[in-house]
Amino acid sequence: MRIGFIGLGIMGKPMSKNLLAAGHDLVVSDHNEAAAAELLALGAKAGGTPREIADVVDVIITMLPNSPQVQDVALGRGGLVETSNTGVVFVDMSSIAPLAARAIHDALADKGIVMLDAPVSGGEPKAIDGTLSIMVGGDATVFERVQPVLAALGSSVVRVGDIGAGNTAKLANQVIVALNIAAVAEALVLAQRSGVAADAVVAAIRGGLAGSTVLDSKAAMMLDHDFKPGFRIELHIKDLINALDTSHEVGAALPLTASVLEMLVALRTGGRARDDHSGLVQYYEQLAGTRIARSQTNQEG
């Protein structure tokens, strides 16, 4: 299938590589020149504006930071809304506000262009190995058309409802992940401050009810203070703001989410915006006046 891809960042570049590996013809945006060059060397073709890419593909995928960027690509000057190829399917895999996804869908529908919202979970590691969890909103028939494409990117591809439902599911995911990271950080700082090795606590609890994917993937980063981003704090802030905005619109209070958002904002203010979200442990360390560590280097800060 001919696929266009716009947004070759931490997630988009490995996703594009997986589409090439699956045998699809790929046209990529050259906005990120270094990433585009890497993909061109693997057989992708360079595209121009979103409209120009949409003119020559069957499916166009975006993986962008937030709602305004997706809106610009879809509806701005030179956007895919101007394409004459009304058979193209637009799949936005960014994490944006559900209401924004619906508004973009409706504007494209007026031009005869169909859209799915299909945000992902799993971060850079699962983008690399093609095992993302993909949550899809939109028409069931359109979903069936592009499901084989999405299957090259994720091990779980689930349609959860109509347009906007994918991003609602992603917001729920991000709430759970944020609160889980906060709980892990809080618990490990408690252990450290109590004089018990934090890594020993992780080993002791991971097989029980407290075990989780977050504990397995993020505790080691906390213990090693390795905050190279798989998913940046600044992006999780964006997602939680979208979650709270949505919660206000529908009348679902999210008090724990609001608390974790404030912690992340404090870290951003302290220059940690580009840290991995596991860096949330630094907030708790500062409050407790300690630094968690593996037992062989255990030390109080």
Image (cartoon, rainbow, N blue to C red):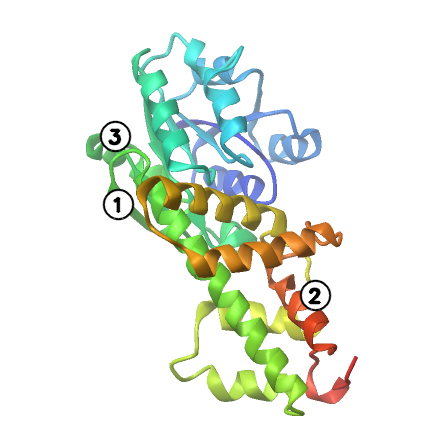
In which quadrant is the N terminus drawn? top left
Q: Amino acid at mark 3?
A: Val
Q: Amino acid at mark 1?
A: Val
Give the percent coordinates (x, y) of residue 61: 45, 30
In the rendered image, the residue lying farthest to the bottom is 195
| Marks 2 and 1, how far apart at CA | 35 Å
Q: Is residue 33 above or below residue 12?
A: above
Q: Which residue is mark 3?
A: 142
Q: Secondary structure at mark 3?
A: helix
Q: Is residue 182 left or right of residue 267?
A: left
In the rendered image, the residue lying farthest to the left is 141
Give the percent coordinates (x, y) of residue 260: 54, 59
Q: Is residue 46 visible?
A: yes
Q: Residue at x 51, y 18 (%)?
A: 50
Q: Is residue 220 above or below residue 73?
A: below
| Marks 2 and 3, how far apart at CA | 41 Å
Give the percent coordinates (x, y) of residue 102: 34, 28
Category of crowding for the residue at label 3, using alpha-carbon neighbours closer than 10 angstroms: few (below 14), some (14–19), many (at least 20): some
Q: Residue at x 65, y 62 (%)?
A: 279
Q: Which residue is mark 1?
A: 160
Q: Which residue is mark 2?
A: 226
